[in-house]
Image: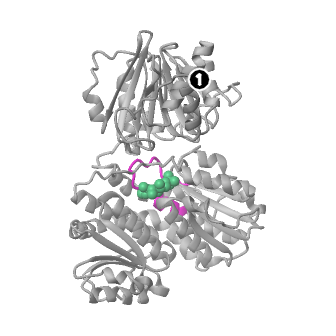
Amino acid sequence: MCGITGFTGYTLALPILMQGLEKLEYRGYDSAGVTLADDIGLVTLKAKGRLSELRSILDESELLQMTGIGHTRWATHGVPNNLNAHPHTNKRNTISLVHNGIIENYMSLKQMLENFDYDFKSETDSEVIVHLIDFYYRQCLDMETAFKKAVGDLEGSYGICVVSRHSPNKIFVARKESPMILGIGKEGSFCASDVPALLEYTRQLISLNDGDTAILEPDKITVFDAEGKEKPIEWMDSPYDMQSAQKGGYDTFMEKEIHEQPQTIKETLRGRLSGRKIVLPELDDIRDNLKNINSVIWIACGTAYHACVYGQMILNKHVPINSIAVPASEFRYGNYHVDRNTLCIFVSQSGETADTLAAIKMAKERGALTIAVANVLGSSLTRLADTTIYTCAGLEIAVASTKAYTAQLVLLYMLASKLSEIMGYSISEHQEIITNLRQLSNMTQQFLECCKPVVKEYAQMMKDERDVYFIGRQLDYVSAMEGALKLKEISYIHADAYYAGELKHGPIALIQYQKIVVAFATQPEVSAKTISNIKETVARGARVILITDKDTKADGFSYIIRLPQIHPELSCITSAIVFQLLAYYAAVERGCDVDKPRNLAKSVTVE
Ligand code: M6R
């Protein structure tokens, strides 16, 4: 979603703000702006569109201030234009603000301020905050007090940075349910909505807690709790380095991240296999509670939701317990039975997805036991869950999730398997699967390299299609769903997933001569049936790209990819390599901006 950068220090602020915004471009945006501050006043410049538009109106030789804030906006309240773009300033141009999140009570605050003759220039909810700070400043003539009072009036979610002519070398920061990272380095103090914006300058970071505020000065950062009391800062050394925020020789982040999967799978497994056992010490503290669980709900959004469907299916294969996967955006409004005997598992790459956060809060209110499966250390989700198990996929920058997805599958396999063990059920063929998990990193490395040429050829065939159909049964349906999502989000080819057995109940009406069907058949108990479903589409002239295992009998298919030998419960992981590359090459062929697909944001922090 929107990106925030802020800097106050001993060197020019503008280059630092702009490079930070560039590093956050992957989060998606449609306008951008900066405010630079000194004791002479504030200079604010904004532009609709890409950062290049903003750059074209910046005169770097004039903008020599050492304090400033920057923002990339993804429109929620109000269309993308210069007025709605951040930063927002007060009438006297003495205070300027950038904001991520949604202010839920902005209408009532706006009405109150209008009664005091405040004018509003934009359609955003954010603008209300800057006028509110101004309102309090006029009463107390102290920026710190005015800022804290204004923040105290806000309902909703926010990551806020404010600069002011009244305190020209300070940045006032607040956070609630919207990420905010602070850092300190030799050039000064920094803040940003995500780590990549800061890595070039410092790895000494903290993630501000919900409800906290902070004041940044060139030589120090002071953090306050919700009551306004100063808190000690525990700096952490960022686990990421500059290299992880660069493309490293690949054309795009997505291509790089697809190729990182052998490594990220290895990292996710590291220390979690011991002899013939899966080891998840993160479950130790809740082990006793797990024994009382009588239903499991897997909750997430988008790609992470598909990983949840996988987790749910694996658990259901081995444990006769109620287990369902629900999109987080639906969970809150469906009347699901949740109580203290329910285990809710929340999966999220970013750990900041608004729907997933809202869902975990609701589950906790009802007394559920909660586990987070997240990729970002210290993210909001991990602070809410009873325990967190981390995927170790590293920084994922491309909007389309790839390496985080396969890391989630690996981890959810282990989690489902461990839950079965704790609940007193054994996993059939467990040893074979453990052996396969140990081989998985090398297997994906070899397969990735050898399947690329053929996948590229099939993507070429797909590039001018309007619609593509993905089909599969059982675990292969997970691959169909995620394959269709990958293709549509980055190539804009319409793609949908169907259960192969459901084709004849409707979707087959869409199959005409030369239509493309991507079919997965890796599950021995249903592969033969899937093949006959596929033949029904071939009979109607479809071109079928079949992704199957070594053993399935599949004669007469012109476009076929055989996966390496792996237990069927893990084949979703190798299938992912194929459909990720297929989507990637198709998008490249169509000239799409693969890393920044239109209308999408890397982490969706609004509901
Ligand atoms: O950060 P999260 O895993 O919670 O994000 C969930 C979805 O927004 C995300 O997976 C989205 O669907 C991706 N664009 C898929 O590639």
Q: Nearer the viewer, residue 370 or 35?
A: 35
Location of residue 197 (image quadrant) = top left
At 56% from the left and 45% from the top, the residue drawn is 377
Colouring scheme, one of rainbow, by chain, secondary structure, one colour: one colour
Figure quadrant of the N terminus: top left
Instruction: Please tell me which residue is depicted at 38% across the width and 79% down the height of the picture.
Output: 548
Q: x, y percentage for residue 8?
A: 47, 20
User: Quick check: 124 above or below 417?
Assistant: above
| Element on which disc 1 rests | helix
Q: Is mark 1 within 8 Å of ligand 1?
A: no
Instruction: Tell me residue 149's x, y (percent).
Output: 64, 25
Farthest top residue? Answer: 40
Q: Is residue 401 magenta?
A: yes
How many numbered discs, if any?
Answer: 1
Magenta range is 390-411
Q: Is residue 424 visible?
A: yes
Q: Amino acid at mark 1?
A: Phe
Q: Is residue 57 above or below residue 560?
A: above
Quick check: can you spot residue 349? no
Decide: is 41 above or below 395: above
**562 inside magenta stretch:** no
Q: Quadrant of residue 140?
A: top right
Judge by depth and name the residue closer to the eye, 558 or 36. 36
- Is residue 492 rendered to the left or right of residue 395? left
Tell me the residue that label 1 is attached to.
Answer: 147
Residue 59 rendering spot, x and y as whole percentages? 27, 20
Q: Nearer the viewer, residue 227 or 77?
A: 77
